Amino acid sequence: MINLDSTDQALLAVLRSNARLPVVDIAKQLGVSRATVQNRMKRLEKSGVVRGYTVLVRPEVQEYPVRALMSIAVGSRSEASVIESLRGIPNVVAVHHTTGRWDLIAEIRTDTLANFNAIVGKIRRLDGIEATETNLLLDSVGSDN
């Protein structure tokens, strides 16, 4: 793993905030030269620290405006098969291992509440799932919505 110094960390924070900011503006914010910013960005990309750049879209124009997090408890012997089943559901965009009461968190995105209800029902019926708790995402703080 690459060692990130305070300038790398500051650069990543600026990029998280606005990855389209011109290199000259980033350099001014960080108090370093344009060449330093370009070299560090290339190094972070080449090392895999920065895997890409993305666009944040306002929720009301997204194809899948209904977003939720489903907390899932599974039997320890069933975890691998539950994860495989979840990854096979197109509207489950990510599955995360967690600590605490829940074993997994599934991120769900869909177009309507009716479809969301069907997806939740499908997930709850998967073999190995012992309990679930689902939370609709109303807003995301810090994004441009």
Image: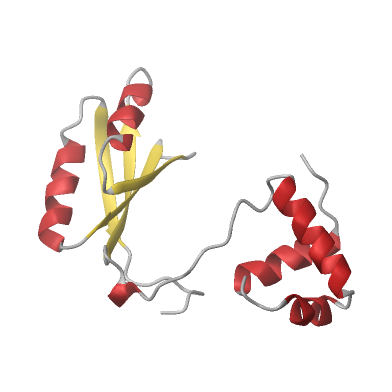
Q: Residue extending furthest top?
A: 77
Q: How is the image coloured?
A: secondary structure
Q: Give above or below for 64 relative to 104.
A: below
Which quadrant would the C terminus be assigned to in this image? bottom left
Which quadrant would the N terminus be assigned to in this image? top right
Residue 11 quadrant: bottom right
Residue 62: percent from left, percent from top = 31, 69
Residue visible at 82% across and 82% down? 28
Residue visible at 17% across and 55% down? 116
Residue 103: percent from left, percent from top = 40, 35
Residue visible at 15% across and 63% down? 112
Residue visible at 14% across and 43% down? 121
Please give left or right for residue 18 compared with residue 129 in the image: right
Q: Give above or below for 39 relative to 79.
A: below
Q: Give above or below for 92 relative to 87.
A: below
Please give left or right for residue 74 compared with residue 41 in the image: left
Q: Give above or below for 125 relative to 55.
A: above
- Of 22 and 144, which appears nearest the observer? 22
- Number of labelled discs? 0
Q: Is residue 114 visible?
A: yes
Residue 19 quadrant: bottom right
Q: Is residue 102 visible?
A: no
Residue 106: percent from left, percent from top = 35, 45
Residue 16: percent from left, percent from top = 62, 67
- Of 142 and 103, which appears nearest the observer? 142
